């Protein structure tokens, strides 16, 4: 363990999702892997997670679950006490505390469709539970590391809560922004019921959670934490601009001395074509024949015969952020003769309907799996040739990192984490993909055309694939950066 004089560094990550127990997006992947990577840095990192429906059963099935609760904790919210049993589990080396509170944690979708004084309560409880946990087992972290708006109240409570502010000297706090688009904005009338002092909401204090007449819990985390991070260096700069800051750019600029951009990693125990149990044939740089077998299996899954057209893939959420509209527009002129496209992902009804219609219009060129299907996702990464990531904005992005591992070459917009991780192959012999800048269908189409031209040149394409598959985006590098951040905070106190 990292030792400072007479104590060991301990970190508690507080989050609403953690793969493989509960996952809706990239945050779940981060929470499921970063704490394990921190252990390699000799940091005792653990996770506090709600027991959403099915989580306890899954923990018992895939890990070691202590069925005897550690005990119960209570949190006062809206003038009543909410009580949860705390269960302890080991999930492949990940130490997890599960909050069993069926009244609050009953939504299998995790995130509410609409944020109001009732639907935000589960996340406030989760945040405050981090202060109560040490009373049960004596394990007391030096750092409380919260993630996104859902656990943003942690550091704000240490500043402004009537009771928990007395714990302020006990903890240092780090807050990570995974996606600034979701800030936890709600009517400020909730604060009294949460136990916050009036100072938490004041238009006379720029550090308070006041935000254009509303309460913004993410703003409170930015101003009150010892440090805050984003999930890539470029995104840390994007959010300091009016376009990328989404109303918080002024706050972020004012606090930028404590901001760091740390790129996410991927778990190569899960995403590795050499060992992947979800694909029909394993492969590596030394022997790529298995990728052709995966292509054949993907074509069969789509109900297509192989006509030689390259397979473009999209794996991710079907949302405006991911550039779905632009992607379908750019592909229209390329389908039928030049490419096929396999889409795997879920999203809101509007984009689901659009992709369904797109598939119906191009049955021999477009295949869509409109849910997150792990088997299909692995097969698609392995069997595809080119990954499309035309994101409007991208805090980090994991799909391009996974695609690298499988020798599937990304065509991506140069924004956020995509700009940090993808090297344009027409501009460098170290190239790992193809980038474009302007958010237009024509620019995306040009980038796809460049990738298709490169694919015709076997020597060039093989070099790009080699560069991509040789890239190292393991969590080990990211964990070192977080360990350095924790260390810097401790030594500055």
Image (cartoon, rainbow, N blue to C red):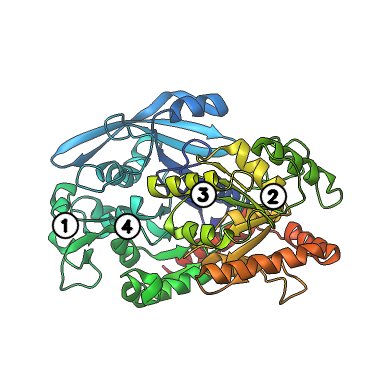
Determine the CA span between mark 3 and mark 1: 43 Å
Precedes in sequence: disc 3 or disc 1:
1
**SS of the residue under disc 3:** helix
Distance from the alpha carbon under mark 3 to that under mark 2? 19 Å
Which mark sits nearer the N-terminus, 4 or 3?
4
Q: CA distance from mark 4 to mark 2?
A: 43 Å
Residue lying at 40% horizontally and 75% vertically, measured from the top left? 240
Q: Nearer the viewer, residue 423 or 137?
A: 423
Residue under numbered circle 3:
358
The quadrant holding residue 87 is top left
**Mark with earlier residue (4, 2):** 4
Identify the residue position indicated by label 2 in the image: 384
Residue 257 x, y percent position in the rendering:
42, 76
Circle nearer the viewer, 3 or 1: 3
- Please name which of the two marks, 4 or 3, marks the residue nearer to the observer: 3
Earlier along the polypeptide chain: callout 1 or callout 4? 4
Q: Residue at x 68, y 71 (%)?
A: 424
Residue 163 drawn at (x, y percent): 20, 50
Q: Which mark is residue 155?
A: 4
């Amino acid at each position: 363990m990292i030792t400072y004089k007479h104590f060991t560094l301990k970190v508690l990550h507080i989050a609403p999702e953690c793969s493989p127990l509960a996952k809706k997006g990239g945050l779940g992947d981060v929470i499921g892997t970063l704490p394990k990577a921190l252990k390699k840095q000799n940091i005792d990192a653990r996770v506090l997670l709600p027991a959403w429906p099915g989580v306890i059963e899954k923990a018992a099935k895939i890990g070691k679950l202590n069925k005897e609760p550690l005990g119960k904790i209570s949190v006062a919210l809206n003038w009543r006490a909410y009580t949860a049993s705390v269960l302890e589990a080991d999930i492949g080396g990940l130490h997890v505390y599960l909050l069993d509170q069926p009244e609050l944690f009953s939504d299998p979708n995790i995130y509410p469709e609409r944020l109001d004084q009732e639907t935000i309560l589960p996340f406030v409880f989760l945040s405050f539970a981090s202060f109560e946990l040490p009373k049960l087992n004596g394990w007391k972290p030096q750092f409380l590391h919260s993630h996104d708006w859902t656990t943003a109240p942690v550091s704000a409570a240490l500043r402004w809560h009537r009771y928990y502010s007395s714990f302020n000297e006990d903890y240092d706090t780090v807050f990570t922004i995974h996606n600034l688009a979701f800030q936890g904005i709600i009517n400020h009338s909730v604060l009294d019921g949460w136990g916050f002092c009036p100072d938490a909401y004041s238009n006379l204090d720029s550090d308070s959670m006041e935000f254009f007449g509303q309460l913004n819990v993410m703003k409170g985390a930015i101003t009150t934490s010892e440090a805050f991070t984003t999930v890539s260096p470029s995104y840390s700069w994007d959010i300091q601009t009016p376009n990328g800051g989404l109303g918080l750019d002024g706050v972020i600029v004012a606090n930028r001395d404590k901001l760091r951009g740390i790129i996410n990693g991927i778990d190569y125990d899960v995403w590795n074509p050499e060992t992947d149990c979800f694909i029909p044939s394993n492969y590596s740089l030394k022997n790529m024949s298995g990728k052709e077998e995966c292509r054949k299996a993907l074509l069969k899954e789509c109900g297509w015969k192989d006509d030689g057209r390259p397979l473009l893939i999209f794996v991710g959420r079907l949302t405006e952020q991911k550039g779905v509209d632009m992607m379908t527009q750019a592909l229209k002129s390329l389908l039928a003769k030049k490419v096929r496209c396999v889409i795997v992902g879920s999203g809101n009804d509007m984009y689901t309907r659009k992709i369904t219609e797109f598939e119906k219009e191009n049955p021999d060129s477009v295949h869509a799996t409109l849910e997150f299907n792990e088997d299909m996702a692995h097969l698609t990464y392995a069997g595809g040739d080119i990954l499309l990531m035309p994101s409007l904005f991208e805090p980090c992005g994991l799909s391009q990192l996974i695609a690298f591992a499988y020798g599937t070459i990304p065509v991506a917009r140069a924004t956020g984490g995509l700009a940090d991780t993808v090297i344009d192959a027409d501009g460098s012999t170290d190239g790992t993909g193809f980038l474009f800048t302007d958010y237009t269908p024509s620019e995306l189409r040009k980038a796809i055309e460049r990738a298709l031209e490169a694919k015709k040149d076997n020597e060039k394409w093989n070099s790009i694939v080699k560069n991509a598959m040789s890239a190292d985006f393991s969590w080990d590098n990211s964990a070192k950066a977080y360990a350095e951040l924790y260390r810097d905070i401790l030594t500055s106190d």
